[in-house]
Image: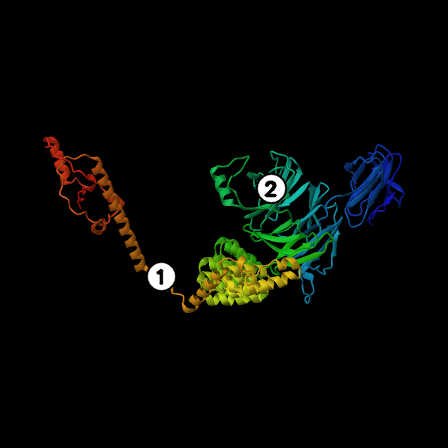
Amino acid sequence: VDYFTGGDRPYLISGADDKLVKIWDYQTKSCVQTLDGHSHNVSAVAFHPELPIIITGSEDGTLRIWHQTTYRLENTLNYGLERVWAIGVIKGSNAVSVGYDEGTVMFKVGREDPVVSMDASGKIVYAKHNEVQTVNVKALPQDYEIADGERLPLAAKDFGSCDLYPQSIEHNPNGRFITACGDGEYIIYTALAWRNKAFGSALEFGWSTDASEYAIRESPSKIKIFKNFKEKLEFRPHFAAEGLHGGTLLGLRSTDFICFYDWEQANVIQRIDATVRDVKWSESGEMCCIISESSFYILRYDPEVVATAFESGEFDEGEGVEDSFELLAEISEAVLTGIWVGDCFVYNNSDMRLNYVIGGDVTTLFHMDRPMYLLGYLAAQSRLYLMDKEFQIVTYTMLLSVIEFKTLVLRGELEAAEELLTSIPTEHHNSVARFLEARGLVSDALRVATDPDFKFELAVQLGELRIAKEIIESYNDDVGENKWKQLGELAMSTGELDLAAACLDRSGDLSGQLLLASAAANPKQLMQLAEVAKSKGKNNVAFVCLFSLGNIDACLDLLVETGRVPEAAFMARTYSPSRVSEIVQLWKSDLGKINKKAAEALADPAEFSNLFPNFDEALAMEEDVKKTKMSSKRPPASAYGGEQELAKQVEKSATIEAEQEEQKQTETREQGNKEEPTHAPPTPKSPPKSPKKEAKKATPPASPKAATPPPPSPKKKEVEKAKEIPAPKIPTPKSPKKATPPASPK
């Protein structure tokens, strides 16, 4: 047995072994209704305290859910856990718990989001079961300071009761009428006095942008459109409509697409293939948001394209006008509720964040601590209003000037946006700057931004390193160290070495400073860097600086001070033999604390000179090097020769190449003369010419291409003539090796 929790009906419910469930009026002791459906003993019954349902359980293993008003069977559940023995419900929650032979099951029935609607003036109407209440957000005390995210102290008033259990409440566009829809019916009430204006059968209801026009879905195959509360049009879609959405166009959704119709003649405007859960239209009728389970789409509707297509007849009756909608953005976020504010779509998602999107750019306004449901926006207060499932009203600030600024930027009206910027509070400039950066207006974003970190990023992005330096000069040393290092590396990559040196010095980046000092060959800077590195414990950097300066003694002292005596000994053996004995003694004393035998095994060149060959020569060489360093100065770079010296070297190398080429040609001709027999008379002996003198006379060839074969000499022509006339027998010289080869013609 269970009692009805509402105060309007004195009912109780009972279940028995006759397999029947009966509802009784305990005042008149009469049976109001009998519910028949279970096939075994009824073991548990309950009135749900929040929803208009009756839950019954039986030993047949089934759980049946009945409508509390119509007593219609709504659903039957069977979890396969044998017999049902107990049903538990709790006030303030939609949860239901059921106890079986084999276990316990808990589930939620219905939805927890409030049935509520808000008009443009701030009047909110919501339903608790069949009771309707109202509250006005403008009724706050004048001295009350509104804080974002806090519940408003608003007193609710009873507005009346609804003749059906409302599943949705919606104001018409001008706020004069309110529609309540549920239990397969709809009722239109007046917004001022809550009086019944019209009613009828409908699964769903939707208002047009025209305040006197609406549509209902009587069944999946039957749609009706009303004008001034009179039926205007009835049509049957070519598919099973599972949902209806009002707005600028009438939307009918199926499982995997939505089809939009006009309100005048129910012509198909366009079919969009998407799994749709809800549709939201802007007040202007140009923007539309299609919401699916895991994402939403922002589209722009063009009525001129539709009108032109209908006039010319260029449209498909089944698919509509192809270019009537333009996709602006697709965002992968699960939307709970959403509204339009101008061309800005405001929504809260499953992560409990309140966001808005303009032109595909998503901005997070606030993070919420519990699920909320958007009601509306009051431009006069620049505030969004939301409600939680306990019917508490919460407000958040959203400046209309920021929305208008971003809208103007999207439209390309930058001058008007610049004028509007002065009206935006400073604390919202960073949001505006990030929007400008996303649109590619980085220089404007740098001018508007106030956050130092963000300004630094923008300055680096623009390559304005001097501006970036000015920005981070306002940082504390511990905060801006990484920024200085980043800026120094960028300045080094762009060749601004002065800026790089200053930034690396401020950041304490000793490795970068070492790179700059060694590249510039600046002894003074290297010495200063060595001192700083030693004071900060960066001994590696200090050692490299001292070694680059050639200060071997300082390098050895640094190694000894840091406890690296073995390395110091080996370095002294190579670069400073005079200090080997000193450092070996230190090594012995240090090693003797750990292992005396190992320390005694170390040899000192002062005692064991036979183990150090050529050690005396190394000492003498060290003294010579020291004297040379003390007596000589480092020559400047100009002493190594400039362009003139380079030209001389090039000319000298070219002359040497020419001499080598001439010598090769001479040797080739000599070899040819030896192999070819000649009958010409021997030439008188003449002293051989010096090849060096001839090399001086010879001019270098202009290029390798100029090496053409030399013209035939006159003597060769005589040899050819001698072949035609029989040559006399002339004895050949006895020693052909001493014969002087003919001089080559120039």
Q: Nearer the viewer, mark 2 or mark 1?
A: 1
Q: Is residue 14 left or right of residue 731?
A: right
237, 668: nearer the viewer: 668
Applied colour scheme: rainbow
- Residue 406 lies, in percent from the top left, at 53, 56
Query: Which residue is the site of mark 2?
Result: 251
Q: Quadrant of residue 393?
A: bottom right
**Residue lying furthest bottom in this view?**
631
Residue 620 visible in rendering: yes
Tag 1, which secondary structure?
A: helix
Report, in whole angstroms, how far the alpha carbon at label 2 lies from the one at label 1.
87 Å
- Residue 75 lies, in percent from the top left, at 76, 37
Query: Which residue is the site of mark 1?
Result: 640
Question: Which quarter of the rendering shows the N terminus?
Answer: top right
41, 627: nearer the viewer: 627
Residue visible at 65% across and 53% down in the picture: 353
Amino acid type of disc 2?
A: Gly
Q: Is residue 261 above or below residue 376?
A: above
Would you call the spot at circle 2 few (<14 residues within 10 Å), some (14-19), or many (20 or more)? many
- Residue 501 lies, in percent from the top left, at 48, 64
Would you call the spot at circle 1 few (<14 residues within 10 Å), some (14-19), or many (20 or more)? few
Amino acid type of disc 1?
A: Tyr
Q: Is residue 273 above or below residue 395?
A: above
